[in-house]
Amino acid sequence: MEIPENVKRRLSLPFEENFYAGHTACQGCAAALGLRYVLKAYGKKAIFAIPACCSTIIAGPWPYSAFNAPLFHTAFETTGAVISGIEAALKAKGYKVKGEEGIMVVGWAGDGGTADIGLQALSGFLERGHDGLYIMYDNEAYMNTGIQRSSSTPYGAWTTNTPGGKKHFLERRHKKKVIDIVIAHKIPYAATASVAFPEDLMRKLKKAQRIPGPSFIQLFAPCPTGWRSPTDKSIELARLAVQTAYFPLFEYENGKYKINMPSTKKEPKPLEEFLKLQGRFKYMSKEDIEVLQKWVLMEWEELKKKAEVFG
Amino acid sequence: MEYKPIKKVISGNYAAAYAAKDARVEVVAAYPITPQTSIIEKISEFLANGEVENLQYVPVESEHSAMAACIGASAAGARTFTATSAQGLALMHEMLHWASGARLPVVMVDVNRAMAPPWSVWDDQTDSLAQRDTGWMQFYAENNQEVYDGVLMAFKVAETVNLPAMIIESAFILSHTYDVVEMVPQELVDEFLPPRKPLYTLTDFDNPIAVGALGTPADYYEFRYKIEKAMAEARKVIKNVGKEFGERFGRDYSQMIELYRTEDADFVFMGLGSLMGTVKQAVDVLRSEGYKVGAAKVRWFRPFPKEELYELARHVEGIAVLDRNFSFGQEGILFNEAKGVLYNTDAHPAMKNYIVGLGGRDFTVDDVRKIAEDMKTIIECKKIDKEVEWYHLKR
Amino acid sequence: MNTLFGERKSNAKRIVFKSVDEYPEAPISLGTTLINFTGDWRTFIPVVNDEKCVKCYICWKFCPEPAIFIREDGYVSIDYDYCKGCGICANECPTRAITMVKEEK
């Protein structure tokens, strides 16, 4: 069943769906949406490796799969290593990897499985120069195990092991900048992306497909369940994150930083616009919000300077 | 083509490397650890000299990642190989379960080495035996030749039953000691071991599959049974492949327990790996002195050769089980498993456990003699003084 | 006609094994999640007003299931078998053509 060509042409994303509905992601899950986008970008000729995370469940229980592409479920800390092995096997067998006709090897892991337990394997994958793509979808906590903090959890966020309480809230550590760690490996291509800007994400996915070597994308993916936000606001939050410069969109390509629209358009919106939609920030006092706001602007200045110097 | 062996004087490690090369392995992902390093170094040398086609070598950043990468590669249809030892094997533990659960025929050489602390690099069997529950087949090599032969056979058996296999050799005693090894010319290896036909592959894009998703209590049980069924099937496959190996290359491996001079033995020594080489020597000496003894070398620890053990146990009055390992809070592992196998049968020879050579303490012909004297007394008096003897303990 | 999944949806079958011999040797998938109608998760149901719709397809773009499909005439329809009622489509629609209504069961 097809839709008319003139309609298809108006779509800003590929029409083909390779992600099947009926999966058990929460209502308003941006990770599921992210998967839908990646599967759109690469179609069937992509091999996915997914560690323990929400996507393990979203991908469907045996014997059902939500993917119209091959997928290997693997242990929590191994994403970077498994995609390295798959890539090596494809090369040994003479398959083309990456590029127009090539097979994409994609590791899709959460922030917990990347920034914490999976950091070693990620570093190995990046350092060895495998032709593959690692996508860290960032919902800022260990969501699948019930919302525990990860090193990607921001200052002030409630999680089940950094809860608000009668004394004070516990998460006083700032979000670990995984993208900076990745860039320190000086790989050919790294980028941040947000589910609110799928065209930008699609462009970056296509770039990752074209550019040889290891690619990395950190995808901002709001989680209504873990963030205590309304299910219909997930895209709005992903947009506000970019507009407040909390999660700026930029690319690192062959040593050069480039900030993407719309982050460069105007002054960042006040962070409160982003925070107030989420219950996880309700334990923050005015001073706490100022601390986080300061951090956001400081990181934003640093990024702008990098784009200036290494642009 | 007639079999004309290629003879080289090489170490056990090099034997492993040559076997992996001859098996036309496609992906090797490994991390260095003493005393495995020369296996991987040799393979890298082959690569650098252009002696291996279609080999991808991935110098991973830990043993856990080594096994993870091998698993990914194997799931994509490649023939994969790795090697490790002690701490590295222990680090891989989680992924060992993954390889068998995903039914991937990864082949690995483990160099038996003692577990730390204290740090030790010497021969000890606890590291590999501690992995006996992971669904991996286990073959213990007595000498460098068996390392070479074992790796070749392991690929064939593993790829037939779709279970991973490890070939185990002693630290330094085999890994770094040079001995004559007869290797098989490539064309004959190719006849014995054709290219792998994977059970499934991630490269099937027309019918894409998800491997290893969530299995609820309604389904998980059956998959575990399938693994055991494959292990049971492996007993037959091992014997057939071992027989075939003998027919093609003159070295028969159809017995899961190699019996040396056990036909009329009063009692036998039973054990794993290189220490059985010493035992065989001692058996010859003891026989010349009038003892009627034999050696039962357990080649395959997994799947456990239950039938063969029963057949042996029926005809002897005693078994001295030599364990170069220990399971704390219990006893020597081979001893414990062998006893368990015989419990429900009518074969109940006197069995005593001798804990020898832990951490590479030297195990000599003289030690075997002393153990023989002890066993003789036990059989004559029809009484076991104590079940487990820490034989080498300084008192 | 559902342009999202069409045939794949109608061909999707529930798989239940009674004997170990029916199981595949390894835990590999045999079907798709399309057999699972998540529509019963809903509390609120999205209703599309074609008169306000400008065919921007933003709703189609942002549906996480996806449960919004484009009709032959270019307007959108919701596949209520899968729609979980998250409300993203209603929240993102620039002309407020979609409204979330409490669903009567």
Image (cartoon, coloured by chain):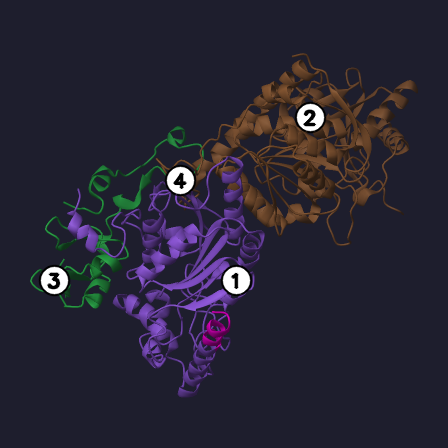
Please give the name of the residue rendered at 71% of the width and 47% of the height, measured from the top-left corner: B33
How much space separates mark 1 and mark 4, taking CA atoms? 40 Å
Q: Are marks 4 and 2 on the same chain?
A: yes
Left or right relative to B26: residue A301: left
- Circle on res. C9: none
| Residue sitting nearer the eye, B339 or C31 | C31
Q: Are marks 2 and 3 in one subunit? A: no
Q: How crowded is mark 1: few (under 14 residues within 10 Å), some or many (20 or more)?
A: many
Question: What's the chain of the residue with tag 3?
Answer: C
Q: What stretch is highlighted in magenta?
A: A302-311
Where on the picture, by quarter, is residue C22? top left
Drawing shade for chain A: purple
Kindly state the secondary structure of the residue where label 2 is placed. helix
Q: From this view, report whether residue B36 is shown above or below residue A158.
A: above
User: Residue A182 bears which disc, if any?
Assistant: 1
Q: Hue of chain B?
A: brown
Per the rendering, the mark at residue B149 is 2
| Chain depicted in green | C
Q: Is residue A91 above or below residue B234?
A: below
Rounded to the nearest angstrom, the CA distance separating label 4 from label 3 is 46 Å
Report which residue position mark 4 lands on: B219
Which chain does tag 4 point to?
B
B234, A172: nearer the viewer? A172
**What residue is at 53 percent from the left and 49 percent from the top?**
A130
Query: Vertical placement of A301 versus A191: above or below?
Result: below
Prevailing secondary structure of the magenta residues:
helix
**Same chain for the residues at labels 4 and 3, yes or no?**
no
Q: Give the x, y percent position of residue B344.
A: 62, 28
Judge depth for marks 4 and 2 and give the one in front. 2
Q: How far apart are marks 2 and 3 (CA)?
A: 72 Å
The residue at 84%/42% (across/down) is B361
